[in-house]
Amino acid sequence: MNPEDLQTARDLVRSARHVVVFTGAGMSAESGIPTFRDPGGVWDQFPPERFATVSGLTSVYRREPDELRRFLYVGMHSLLQAEPNAGHLAIAQLAGATPVTVVTQNIDGLHQRAGSTVVHELHGSMFELYCTQCNRGQRASVDQLRNMVDRLADPLPATAARRRILRILHPIIPKCAHCRGRVRPTVVLFEEMLPPRAWNPAEQAASDCDLMIVVGTSATVHPAALLPELARRVGARIILVNKDPDMRPRGGDIAFTAGAAIALPELIKAD
Ligand code: NAD
């Protein structure tokens, strides 16, 4: 990290009135959760058109239930093993000194587990479920999901595979206790709207902050990727933290080519 930029960034962090930390999959990479778009990432094995849309997932379930099992196993196994890294902890610590709003595209719950209290999950959460009929919410516990993932480890027998997978997935797709409607995780799939209860306060925070720290996102998923632009429009400074040396900062941005777990603790250090 360039020492001059680091000094400027620390001064910005120290003097900020309201910091928004906007995070993507790279935030949790050092916790062991693969990103989607990096080489070797999730999309290399499981193309999004088949595994990140309702119609794609429905078709995989009907035609290749064991592929659905493998996708869920691979995707959820790392997510459930992960612990918050030094970057998540640094963000939570910063909130002790300055008002901090975390806006995340991640579904892993690691910001909250690190101690951040104001967290808007733009793409939902693996641990929160809702009824598609009456909209009532409920939670799935880490233990319930771990148990489910253990049962997804082995290939499904060719016969009765679909029925078998539905039974295994029961913790994330139970029937609603109130209306017997279909329950599903709040995770936002491609082509779905972002939940207003996360998007509205995120948009408001971006339009109110004087510093936005953008961590580990390729900023390609819209509308989430618009948030840094909203912050720039109100005159906020932007600090980018990303492992990609090809990220393109705008004039006035400060960019660090570094991992989140290294860069964020450095940024909040008193010099
Ligand atoms: P992305 O995969 O498109 O981009 C990841 C970015 O992180 C890249 O720019 C990469 O250079 C950077 N990166 C990789 N390792 C890093 C590190 N250690 N430190 C800092 N930066 C690092 O991810 P995205 O922009 O978040 O968009 C993908 C979507 O996939 C999101 O909407 C998110 O919901 C979902 N997703 C979530 C998780 C999770 O919950 N942990 C994991 C994968 C994907």
Image: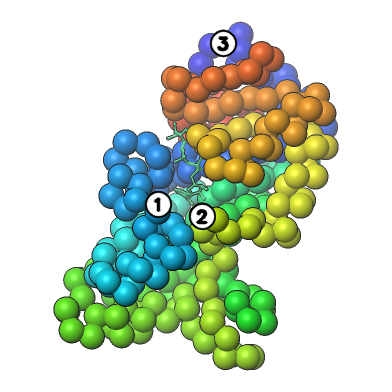
Q: Residue at x 51, y 58 (%)?
A: 189
Q: Residue at x 47, y 78 (%)?
A: 173
Q: Is residue 243 left or right of residue 43?
A: right
Position above or below: 57 against 175? above
**Circles 1, 2 touching at the beta carbon (< 8 Å):** yes
Disc 2 is placed on an element classified as loop
In primary-sequence order, the first of circles 2 and 3 is: 3
Q: Is mark 2 within 8 Å of ligand 1?
A: no
Image coords of residue 239 (percent x, y): 63, 25
Q: Residues within 10 Å of mark 2 (few under 14, many from 20)?
A: some
Q: Is mark 1 within 8 Å of ligand 1?
A: no
**Type of amino acid at the residue the image marks with label 2:** Phe
Between 108 and 99, the one lying in front of the other is 108
- Mark 1 and mark 2: span between their CA atoms? 8 Å
**Type of amino acid at the residue the image marks with label 1:** Pro
> Which of the two marks, 1 or 3, is nearer to us in this view?
1
Quarter-wise, where is residue 74 in the image? Answer: bottom left
Position above or below: 116 against 77? above
**Circles 2, 3 touching at the beta carbon (< 8 Å):** no
Image coords of residue 147 (percent x, y): 36, 74
Which residue in the structure is indicated by mark 2? Answer: 190
Disc 1 is placed on an element classified as helix
Q: Is residue 52 left or right of residue 46?
A: right
Position above or below: 117 against 221? below
Quarter of the image that includes the C terminus: top right
Q: Is residue 198 left or right of residue 160?
A: right
Q: Residues within 10 Å of mark 3 (few under 14, many from 20)?
A: few
Q: Is mark 3 within 8 Å of ligand 1?
A: no
Label ID, residue 271:
none
Which residue in the structure is indicated by mark 3? Answer: 3
Q: Residue at x 49, y 48 (%)?
A: 84
Which residue in the structure is indicated by mark 1? Answer: 48
